[in-house]
Image (cartoon, rainbow, N blue to C red):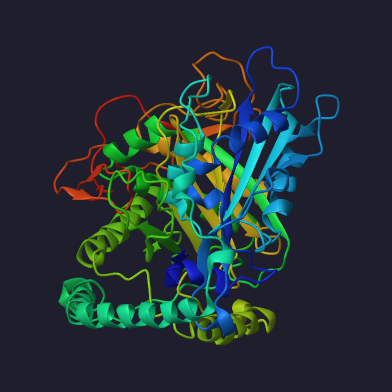
Amino acid sequence: MKTLTGLDATFLYLETPEMPMHVGSFNLCELPAGFRGSFHKAVKSHIARRMHLAPVFSRKLVFMPFDLGHPLWIEAESVDIDFHVRRVPCSAQKPMSLAQAHTMVAKLHSELIDRAYPLWEFYVFDAIKLPSGERVAGFFSKIHHAALDGKGGVMLANAILDIGPVPREVPPPDLARRGKTEADLKIGKMIGSVFSNSLAQVAKLAKSLPAAASTLGSTLARQSLQGAGGRPKMPMKLAPKSPFNTAVTQGRVFVAATVPLAECKAMGKAVGGSFNDVALWICSTALRSYLAQHGSVSTKSLVAAMPVSLREAGASDATDLGNQVSMSLVELGTHIAHPLKRMNAIMASTAKVKTSMQSLKGLLPTDYPSLLAPWLVGGAGKAALNAYGKTGLASRLPMVANLAISNVPGPPVPLYLAGARMLTFHPLSIVLHGLALNITIQTYAGHVDFGIVAGKKALPHAQDLVKAIEDAFRQAQVLVGTGAPTATAPNAAATPGKPPGTRVASATPLGKPPSVKRAASPKITSIKKKANLSDVSNHGTTRTQPVSSKAKPKAGPARRSAA
């Protein structure tokens, strides 16, 4: 029996049919050579043998009497594997197209998880036909955010997946360590745990409050209240109005893009930044392009809400997958036309966030007193959030952010599920009233997978954003000088995780190469290293001074940029 933390429970309290609070991923899988039969059956058998490796598979919710406090995790009496591992209707004779698979994933992601069962569902696609004509399988997972965060998802994947095509042997479950079931619970003990938990949280908060207040005050004074030249400024900027700040319905769109990781890291090093800076620049440039194509570019920078992991480096315990995250705000510089000045703006913003997080990381709480929290957060809080969405205020009132962008470091090597090689690892996350676009980025086996989830109203031309991401990557290659623009999508020449020269279609192919025009005379190629400031992301490359947009280019042939 384990009580949910306040942060974990909040995802339950605020959940509505319009705002499901689960996260997931969609993977394309290369079946083993000569594979015959049903991939769904193979996956179901594989998962059944490994459920004991992570408690998330077998624990379910029990709610407190009268909703006095946070719910409890208890051991389910049994787990119906047929309920949790489901087959999407498609077969070798009637495969789905990739676009159809993305549409199906969006539909499945929009549906609530049944709280009467353990809070996870897996969906298996036996056959997906890629644009090239090649056949692959597919795997979509969704797990409630109350049970894990993004980094916890990577840890869970490490527990159930393998690093080779032959599944490893796992030890059998230890029946002596079986947790308490619902039949073991006593109402008096449950109510007592609410009060003891709340008293412990109050004592913990009281003890940490002076240090937290002092650190927070000095951090705000240093980072937020001090403007250029030491002049005071407003403590918080509101984000500009955008199409992404709108209410959400039950309708979702999901699209995906992939670019090479090594080149992104090289770009970060070339500009004296990090992989995270480059990933944000790609998103910023793509959003600017998308808005220019379908509306207008604001004269103010779009602001991204970016989760920051509070987990210790190297954490790998699959028994502790709950949320250990905080939130930061990053200005994306979308109002800046010059691409290198836009990069400098992003680097300056992430540097401030990093400095603040270094000061506050050990003090940021992920829990709060349990007593009456379901009434306060799940009652008044949910009602206010629903009213905010359904009355149209989400489209009219200013927000502190325009979208969410999350950057999750994933496995550096290919992983296998039931003998099938996972070719991609596109993540899916949550959208909310007023924050209807979420871009989650995960590195996996040498490439960077973008998973884009949005409300249908917020992103009606989703595929254009995918193309804009791919175009932004090519533009970065030319601007930074890491290579000439590629003629096809970065993930089209070879499927991610496959050796070069292996001919497999891209998940989001670009088709014909873009036309090429002379660059609008960017003036940067020389970069001098200076400071040694780690980035906000967990990818951990070092940061140096911003790129100078006035630096003279080194001698050499003129670069060209993709149109």
548 up-or-down from 525: above or below: below
* Quarter of the image where the C terminus is located: top right
**Image position, residue 384 (x, y; %):** 58, 85
Q: With 16 as the anchor, is 321 left or right in this view?
A: left
Quarter of the image for residue 524 reads top left
Say if residue 24 shows up in the picture. Answer: yes
Q: With 268 as the anchor, is 391 left or right in this view?
A: right
182 up-or-down from 282: above or below: below
Residue closest to the far left = 530
Q: With 427 as the anchor, is 521 left or right in this view?
A: left
Residue drawn 58% across the image and 65% down it:
182
Residue drawn 72% across the image and 48% down it:
83
User: In front: 534, or 52?
Assistant: 52
User: In front: 429, or 343?
Assistant: 429
106 up-or-down from 431: above or below: above
479 up-or-down from 441: above or below: above
Residue drawn 55% across the image and 86% down it:
375
Say if residue 506 shows up in the picture. Answer: no
Residue drawn 68% across the image and 26% down it:
136
User: In front: 251, or 411?
Assistant: 411
Number of marks in the image? 0
Quarter of the image for residue 348 reads bottom left
**Image position, residue 89 (x, y; %):** 82, 38
**Image position, residue 266 (x, y; %):** 32, 33
Q: With 139 as the anchor, is 225 left or right in this view?
A: left
